[in-house]
Image (spheres, helix red, strand yellow):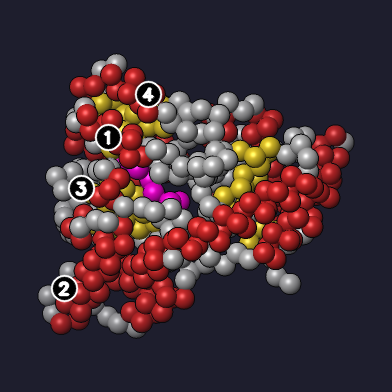
Amino acid sequence: MGAAYLDHASTTPMLPEAIEAMTAQLGQVGNPSSLHAAGRRARRVVEESRETIACALGARPSEVVFTAGGTEADNLAIKGLFWARKRPRILISSVEHHAALDPAHWLGDNHGARVELLDVDERGRVHPETLREAIARDPDDVALVSVMWANNEVGTVQPVRVLAAIAHEYGIPFHTDAVQAVGQLPVSFAESGVDAMTVSGHKVGGPVGVGALLLARGVDPVPVLHGGGQERDIRSGTLDAPAIAGFAAAVETAVARQPATAERLSALRDDLIERVRLAVPDVVLNGDPVNRLPGNAHFSFPGCEGDALLMLLDAKGVECSTGSACSAGVAQPSHVLLAMGQDGARARGSLRFSLGHTSVEEDVDRVAEVIGHVVERARRAGLS
């Protein structure tokens, strides 16, 4: 029996449809910017993929700007909008992924930005009145607002449409990182009212190294990369037609299956939560118990270190995470859990189990079978 892979939030296996679409292009030649026949063929692949993604996500094709992934898209949105707006304040939630937080803090350290972290409640949620109060302190000085659609660690879903509407009352652009949301939640760029939205290929069953920033008409961030002027002069670089084809197939498939996927993963997740609680009665479920990602179960295990739990589970054939994969191996409490009001010990003793399209009941069975023993062993190790 293979390992139970429960780390889909960090990366999920490619969908067969994405593999087929990508491999069909790998043997082809042609730079999408070239004018000869091979270039035009590659350009057609890119533009048809752009249309596919736009249709799946409720956007216009012209609003889809391809990037090398979610991190680049977040950097382009936050840095680019800050530079374009020429205003000092950046309002960003305190529980963002580092791909959004770090560019904001870099602007603060190097370009005079005033980064203001929006507080969250104990479930990791940004309340609309929190944003309104922050803007109202000096609305003319706000360059942008950035709040993720759903949190990558604890799975809490934010009231994005309400928050975007508040920002728009003051004429402020709103960016959301929707990397975790696409494929698990209903996501429509147009209906959300956001101005910029980050999407990543490998989180939805596409290839690593490709993503997109959706930009509403009239929203033009200053480029972070300069070169050939591809992608509306906003993002330069030769476009990876095979990866883009795989990305489009993954988005189309994941969005089409989203209702069924959400129903199936929610049932698996709830079963996982119940069985972990039975095995470890004092475990604490983090995040919003209702408004959370279907595939996310995030726990704190009192008296344990998350890294010890992670390695003990790995030895038992359960692959999960202590939080963001980008922070794996860094011995410090999760900034997300600290922002939610947890102390350092509880934050360090936490694990994320995230399910995806290949998850099955046997994965939950494996966790239930070993979690009690693993927690007992981790607690003994902590006392020695």
Residue marked by disc 3? 216
Q: CA distance from mark 3 to mark 4?
A: 25 Å
Whether the residues at callouts 4 and 2 have beta carbons within 8 Å, the answer is no
179 in magenta: yes
- N-terminal-most mark, 1 or 3: 1
Disc nearest the viewer among 1 and 2? 1
- Amino acid type at circle 3 is Ala
- Amino acid type at circle 4 is Glu
Q: Residue at x 51, y 27 (%)?
A: 121
What element does badge 3 sit on?
loop
The quarter of the image holding the N terminus is: bottom right
**In this rendering, does residue 367 appear at all?**
yes
Magenta-tinted stretch: 175-181
Q: CA distance from mark 1 to mark 2?
A: 41 Å
Disc nearest the viewer among 1 and 3? 1
319 in magenta: no
Disc nearest the viewer among 2 and 3? 3
Whether the residues at callouts 2 and 3 have beta carbons within 8 Å, the answer is no
Whether the residues at callouts 1 and 4 have beta carbons within 8 Å, the answer is no
State the residue in front, 143 or 15: 15
Residue marked by disc 1? 165
**Disc marking residue 127:** none
**Where is residue 264 shown, x and y percent of the image?**
56, 61
Q: Residue at x 62, y 28 (%)?
A: 342
Within 10 Å of disc 3 (Cα), the crowding (few <14, some 14-19, many 20+) is many
Residue marked by disc 2? 34
**Where is residue 352 shown, x and y percent of the image?**
62, 47
Q: Quadrant of residue 257?
A: bottom left
Residue marked by disc 4? 129
